[in-house]
Amino acid sequence: MYLPTHFKQENLPELFDLIEQHSLASVIVTHDGKIEANHIPLELDSTQGELGVLKGHIAKENPLCEILDHPVSAYVIFQAEQAYISPNGYAGKHEHHRVVPTWNYRVVHVTGSIQKIEDQKYLRGILARLTRTHESSQDIPWKMGDAPHDFIEEQLEKIVAIEIEISSIIGKFKVSQNRSKVDAENVAHALEKHHPETSETIRKYHPK
C-alpha cells in the first residue's frame, strides 16, 4: 500500500480499536496462482501471539475451506469511515485554485498465517462472542439459545472456525493531516451532516 509518512499509523491500540469497531474484513489469499477474496466478520484476541489473533468462521462449501488444507498466508483489510473531500473548503480554492479533490479514509492492513480449526467447542465460542458483541445494541439481544437446539446443530455442521495469527499490522489514516488547520476544520465542518464520523476523525487527528 502506498503510505506517505504523514498518513502512517503504527500505534497498536489505535489499530486494534479500528479492527474492533469495524470488524468486517476483506480476507485475501492466493493459491495456485489465483486470488481468493472473502468478506468475513472477525474478532480480535489481542492477548494471543505477539500481535494478536483474528478469529472467525466460514462455510465449509466456501473454496477457502479447501485451500486451508494447506499452509497459506492471508492479507486482511479492515476499513473504517471514508468520504469524498471537495476542494471547495480549501482556502486556496478562493485564492489560486491550485487544489484538487481527494478521499479521506482509515484502513488497517494485516498479514498472517491462516488456518481452519475443526473443533466445535472452539467454533461455538467464536460464534457466541461475535453474537454477543454485535447484538449488544439490540433492545432484546438474540443469543444462540433462542434457536432450536437441532437447528443450531445443523448450522454448525455447515461451518468451520478460522484463525489468523497476525505477523504484521499497519494503518493508513488519511484524514487531512497534510492540510492546514484552517483547511482541515473547513473540511470537517462540510462533512458534519452526511459524514459525521469522518468529520470527528479529522478533528481528532488535526485538532485546533
Image (cartoon, rainbow, N blue to C red):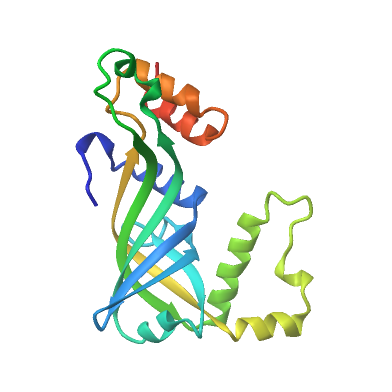
Where in the figure is residue 172, as x and y percent of width and height? Answer: 31, 44
Q: Nearer the viewer, residue 106 or 194?
A: 194
87 left or right, relative to 8: right
192 left or right, relative to 139: left
Residue located at (49% from left, 68% from top): 56
Where in the figure is residue 79, as x and y percent of width and height? Answer: 42, 50
Residue located at (75% from left, 71% from top): 145
Q: Nearer the viewer, residue 53 or 135?
A: 135
Residue 99, by quadrant, is top left
Give above or below for 61 relative to 124: below
Residue located at (44% from left, 32% from top): 201
131 left or right, relative to 204: right
Residue 167, by quadrant, is bottom left
Give above or below for 73 relative to 19: below
**Count of marks, rendered view:** 0
Residue located at (78% from left, 50% from top): 139
Residue 3, by quadrant, is top left
On-image quarter of the C terminus? top left
61 left or right, relative to 182: right
Where in the figure is residue 48, as x and y percent of width and height? Answer: 39, 61
Give above or below for 62 relative to 23: below
Give above or below for 6 relative to 114: above
